[in-house]
């Protein structure tokens, strides 16, 4: 029997399988890489914030000529997707300075723009968010977020007002609450959501309009009609997983993934933003992760 929860899960899994937006966005789409990118600023500027990820099945040959083969395959696949325009039209790409691979992706994209201006790559910006629990770190992050806001306003042609920022903060806080309620289903006794399903739902960001995503998360969190999952409960730690392949193999062997500590999973949800200011955003992204 199809219920609101099962229908929502089906729609979310369909969206996850799409490299870019599942619908045809009426607003500009800005791709982003890493968990340190403040989605709220992109949304407040009238853009769709699309979390970018590659696919293990994509040919990375062209990307490897720029990045080499010694770098994380996930980043090489992501650049391959950008070069092949697999994500659809992008107004720009924001890369967070969260790891060496992300930084190298940014520098390579910037260099491609410099030496090969005819290459069909969207403009790129690096946002450097630091995480030390100090007032000086907070001041630094506020400056970086102001720079990001100015860049995004230029890409979208829309100025971020206090009201638009407040609406974006409210919407993304609602999205986070929906995600928390959904991932709780895999930690119930017994689990009502598999690990691979949870990872896929967490990876939908930007592939559906934000309002529709929040509604689907609410429907899914109801849990009606979702089957119970049997198996040994396991927690995945270590490297980040931008596809469900490893989770699928684990669960095919009789386990259920009920949690993880990488930024394509539940770690990306994080805490809410306490108020609609750049200072509060800077504090939230400083302390997250």
Image (cartoon, helix red, strand yellow):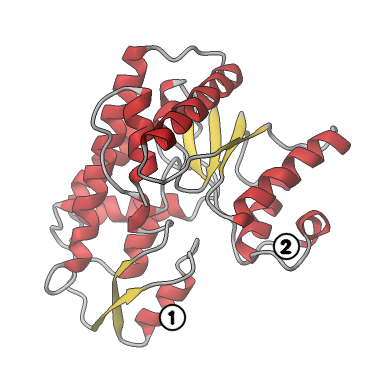
Can you give x and y, in whole percent of width and height, for residue 215 in the image? 24, 39
- Is residue 78 left or right of 286 when viewed as pictured? right
Q: How many marks?
A: 2
Is residue 192 in view from this perspective?
Answer: no
Image coords of residue 130 (percent x, y): 47, 43
* Label 1 secondary element: helix
Q: Residue 27 vs residue 180: left or right? A: right
Pick whichever, 226 or 238, lies toward us: 238
Vertical relation: 48 (above or below) 222: above
> Residue at label 1?
249
Instruction: Give the percent coordinates (x, y) of residue 186.
Output: 22, 66
18 horizontally vs 203: left or right: right
Marks 2 and 1, how far apart in space? 23 Å
Q: Which mark is residue 32?
A: none
Tell me residue 231's x, y (percent). Answer: 24, 84
Characterize the local packing of mark 2: few (<14), some (14-19) or many (20 or more) Cα atoms within 10 angstroms: some
Image-quadrant location for residue 279: top left
**Nearer the N terminus, badge 2 or badge 1?**
2
Please rate how many residues cluster around mark 1, counting C-alpha atoms within 10 Å: few if below 14, some from 14 to 19, many from 20.
few
| Residue at image location 31% in from the left, 35% down from the top | 172
Residue plotted at (32% across, 69% down): 195
Q: Nearer the viewer, residue 108 or 14?
A: 108
| Element on which disc 2 rests | loop
- From this view, report whether residue 140 is shown above or below residue 265: above
Report the front residue among 234 and 85: 234
Quadrant location of residue 77? bottom right
Q: Name, please, the residue furthest toward the right.
A: 115
Residue at 46% from the left image edge and 20% from the top image edge: 45
User: Which residue does the numbered mark 2 point to in the structure image?
Assistant: 59
Viewer can see residue 48: yes
Q: Determine the residue positioned at 38% across, 59% down.
A: 265
């Amino acid at each position: 029997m199809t219920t609101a929860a099962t229908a929502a899960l089906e729609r979310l899994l369909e969206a996850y399988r799409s490299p870019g937006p599942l619908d045809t966005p009426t607003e500009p789409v800005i791709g982003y890489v890493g968990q340190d990118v403040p989605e709220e600023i992109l949304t407040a500027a009238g853009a769709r914030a699309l979390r970018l990820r590659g696919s293990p099945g994509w040919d990375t040959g062209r990307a490897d000529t720029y990045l080499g083969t010694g770098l994380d395959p996930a980043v090489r696949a992501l650049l391959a997707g950008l070069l092949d325009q697999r994500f659809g039209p992008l107004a720009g790409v924001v890369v967070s300075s969260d790891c060496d691979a992300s930084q190298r992706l940014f520098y390579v994209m910037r260099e491609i723009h410099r030496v090969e201006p005819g290459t069909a790559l969207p403009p790129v910006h690096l946002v450097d968010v630091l995480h030390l629990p100090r007032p000086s770190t907070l001041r630094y992050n506020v400056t970086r977020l102001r720079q990001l806001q100015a860049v995004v306003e230029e890409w979208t042609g829309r100025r971020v007002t206090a009201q638009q920022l407040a609406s974006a903060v409210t919407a993304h806080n609602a999205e986070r609450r929906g995600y928390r309620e959904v991932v709780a289903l895999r930690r119930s006794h017994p689990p009502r959501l598999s690990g691979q399903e949870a990872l896929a739902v967490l990876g939908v960001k930007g592939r559906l309009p934000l309002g529709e995503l929040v509604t689907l998360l609410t429907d899914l969190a109801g849990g009606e009609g979702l089957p119970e999952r049997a198996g040994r409960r396991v927690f995945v730690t270590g490297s980040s997983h931008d596809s469900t392949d490893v989770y699928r193999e684990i669960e095919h062997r009789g386990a259920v993934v009920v949690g993880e500590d990488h930024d394509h999973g539940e770690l990306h949800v994080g805490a809410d933003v306490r108020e609609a200011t750049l200072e509060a955003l800077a504090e939230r992204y400083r302390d997250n992760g």
